[in-house]
Amino acid sequence: MLWTILTIAVCVYGSICLFFAIFQRSFIYMPTPATPTHDAAAVLEVPGARLRLSVRPLDGPKALIYFGGNAEDVASTLPELAAAFPDRAIYALHYRGYSGSSGQPAEAAMRNDARVLFQMVHDRHSDVMAVGRSLGSSLAIQLAADGPISRLVLIAPFESILAIASRVAPFLPIRLLLRDPWQSWRYAPRVTCPTLILAASHDEIVPMSDTKKLVEAFQPGVATLRVIDGTNHNSVSGPEEFWKALVGERAASPFHPL
């Protein structure tokens, strides 16, 4: 009887591990559907995919690249960013499989896509700022670590997806199973540009302990942490305090929150 129980338990546990191994990316990426408004978006050709860009064109040296969250339609974010940064051209990337972009989302491919986008933008603008929210924060950190980014802003960033998954499913061998660990802390030590981290005081996905670990991964004096009181992972961009910090305390927000 004991042997039978152990056999059943092993089979059940193995089935759970197999399920996670097969469907793990569906827990990380939640592609947004294509809508007619994306038909006029610019297209970025990358190896294996054609990616949509939501763009606010503007001549001049200044630009901003935006990487959204794992379930965000960045087309809806573009107007707020354009209002916040009237002196910068805005380039918001629709990830593989999101909002009309072809391909399937995966960390290695998305990191390469970010590099291609940066090169295109930097060829047109000498002063490039990077802003990343949640999942997109890891892409923004990467660009700042590898290229000449003038300013970096991270919104509700995480230390790593590996840490989050290990906390959510401590009974699984996450380190062995996870294909896209998204370890932002590996890039942080190479960042030298001014960096602002905007964190929610009650983030239910990224606890403050993880946020502080990410801050500590930067070189001393590079990153500044700003905690937005009374907010969670999704509402962090609601208060006016958030927008003032995002634009560098220039003025009160004249636009709607994300």
Image (cartoon, rainbow, N blue to C red):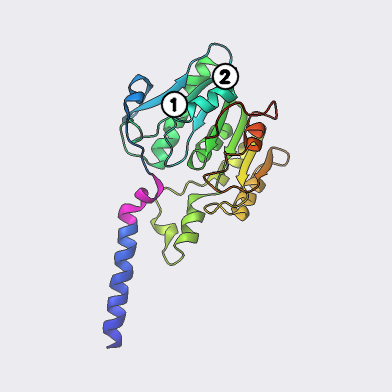
**Crowdedness near tag 1: few (<14), some (14–19) or many (≥20) residues, C-alpha within 10 Å:** some
Q: Quadrant of the N terminus?
A: bottom left
The spot of residue 109 in percent (x, y) is 39, 36
- Determine the residue positioned at 58% across, 34% down: 145
Examine the rendering and report whether any part of residue 147 can be seen.
Answer: no
- Determine the residue positioned at 37% across, 26% down: 52
Residue tagged 2: 88
- Determine the residue positioned at 65% across, 50% down: 212
The spot of residue 146 in percent (x, y) is 55, 32
Give the answer, above or below, for where 72 lies relative to 83: below
Amino acid beneath label 1:
Val
Q: Nearer the viewer, mark 2 or mark 1?
A: 2
> Is residue 25 part of the magenta span, yes or no?
yes
Instruction: Return the residue nearer the eye: 236 or 15.
Output: 236
Give the answer, above or below, for where 223 lies relative to 147: below
Magenta stretch in the rendered image: 21-29
Which one is earlier in the sequence, the residue at label 2 or at label 1?
2
**Left or right side of 189 for 90:** left
Instruction: Return the residue nearer the eye: 2 or 155.
Output: 155
Residue tagged 1: 116
The spot of residue 253 in percent (x, y) is 63, 29
What whole-number distance in Å separates the C-alpha atoms at marks 2 and 1? Answer: 19 Å
Amino acid beneath label 2:
Arg
Q: Secondary structure beneath disc 1?
A: helix
Q: Quadrant of residue 196?
A: top right
**Left or right side of 38 for 88:** right
The numbered mark at residue 253 is none
Examine the rendering and report whether any part of residue 198 can be seen.
Answer: yes
